[in-house]
Image: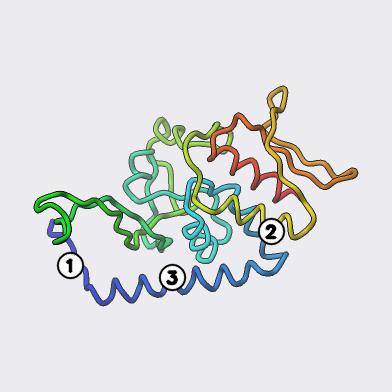
Amino acid sequence: MARKRINPQARQDEIEALQKTIAERVEALHSEVDWEKFLAFAATFYRYSFNNMLLIQAQKPYATYVAGYQSWRSRGRQVRKGEKGIRIFGSRLIDITADEDKEEGTPIKFRKFFPVSVFDISQTDIVDPDKAEEVPTLAQHLQGEAPEGLADTIKQMLRSKGWTVTEQEIPGAANGYTTTKGDKKIVIDESLSPKQALKTLIHETAAL
């Protein structure tokens, strides 16, 4: 099957439209109500960048778990015919030829971003029950780095409302907790990975 030829101008127009949507959603977060809605939504989509979470929420505010078309097929689910994809930014590392200031032939890597489609689980049907059971759940303990800047943005918003966020050892199985008697404080277990710490921060903030 021949690959569909991409119109460069159409792609550029879509990129600009998605960037405009992100800017509009960021502006909307100045409202306390919108912040609370976004934080509750982001608690589900901790795997995605801040910008992509905004795009998913803008296009499908009741989404719960999204993945690409082929990813759903590998998990025993089929996207239903006629379902409209949620457009977000995907990326890949590519090599380019070094510029004149570099040693000739030295490869340079950079990350290229481009629009891709993902689909919510509500847009799919199970076709292989055994594989469908492998869809991740929110209960898993996350590892790795968090989306850059998102935790700082949430902490800044909390400070503006009189809250403090601290990281310290928490005995037992709890990843974090919130205190409202006396000082308004959110405590995150200091042993968590950055990604799990962000998920916990979002969860605690959304519950306020």
Marks 1 & 3, CB-CB < 8 Å contact? no
Question: Cα distance, mark 2 to mark 1?
Answer: 44 Å
Q: Secondary structure at mark 1?
A: loop
Quarter of the image for residue 28 reads bottom right
Q: Residue at x 47, y 50 (%)?
A: 48
Disc assigned to residue 184: none
Q: Are marks 3 and 2 in contact (CB under 8 Å)?
A: no
Pinpoint residue 100: horizontal percent, then vertical percent.
13, 61
Q: Nearer the viewer, residue 132 or 151?
A: 151
Q: Mark 3 to mark 2: distance in Å?
A: 23 Å
Outermost residue toward the top in this view: 172
**Residue at 33 percent of width and 54 percent of height:** 91
Instruction: Say which of 70 and 125 sits in front.
Output: 70
Q: Which residue is mark 2?
A: 157
- Residue name at image x 66 percent, y 59 percent: 37
Density class for disc 3 (Cα within 10 Å; few <14, some 14-19, many ≥20) is some
Residue type pointed to by label 3: Gln
Quadrant containing the N terminus is bottom left
Q: Which residue is mark 1?
A: 5
Please state which of the two labelled residues, at mark 2 or mark 1, is closer to the viewer.
2
* Residue shown at the point (27%, 54%) measured from the top left: 110
Point out residue 208 in the picture as x, y percentages from the top left corner.
77, 51
Residue occupied by mark 3: 19
